Image (cartoon, rainbow, N blue to C red):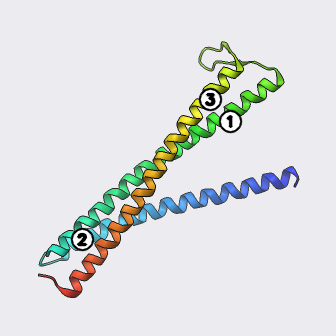
Amino acid sequence: MDKQEVNSLKDSIQYLQRLAIEGQSKFLYFLVGLTFAILGLSLQTTRPVTWVTQISWVMLLSSGLVGIFRIESDPKGRMMESYKLTAEYFKLQFKEARIQGRGVEDESTGDPVPVDEAINKQAVWEKMADERVKKIFWEQEWRYKIQMWAFILGVIGLAVDKIFAFN
């Protein structure tokens, strides 16, 4: 595989990843909007209010709020991912500098820094960011499960209440 094919493949991967992230984000917004629309419509039109309706409202409200928290945490996860990749990039740059016998400067002061120290510092940053990314994405995964189940149970509850007219 030549360099042009490798670059083309990288571009294709990045394009598909961007499409996946955009699609996921659109679905998140859609689901939260749909949840609150169903909840609002039900609040305005349901009479008499039964215990099944009330439980369904709580489920839909929970789903919507958890969805908002998911939307809020998504940029944090992406930012931490970029910090991790940045640390990894600099670590590789510093390793290359060590191989070539070049020095490394401190970004804030411009003073020379031992290359191994700079590599270790980036490795620490990379590890911290990686742990945070894993935690954020684990939280998002659980929020998604809670959001979906609360939404499904809320909609089923409203449908059951309409069908059987619990009083």
Q: Residue at x 61, y 56 (%)?
A: 18
Q: Where 17 falls versus 35 (above or below)?
A: above
Mark earlier in primary sequence (2, 3): 2
Where, quadrant-wise, is the C terminus in this rendering?
A: bottom left
**Which is in the foreground here, disc 1 or disc 3?**
3
Examine the rendering and report whether any part of residue 120 can be seen: yes
Amino acid residing under circle 1: Tyr
- Picture coordinates of residue 24, whole percent (x, y): 51, 61
Mark earlier in primary sequence (1, 3): 1
Specify few, some or many for label 3: CA neighbours under 10 Å numbering under 14, 14-19, or 20 or more.
many
Q: Residue at x 46, y 50 (%)?
A: 74
Amino acid residing under circle 2: Ser
- Picture coordinates of residue 103, whole percent (x, y): 75, 18
Left or right position of 35 against 140: left
The front one of 43 and 60 is: 60
Q: Which mark is residue 122?
A: 3
- Picture coordinates of residue 11, whole percent (x, y): 73, 54
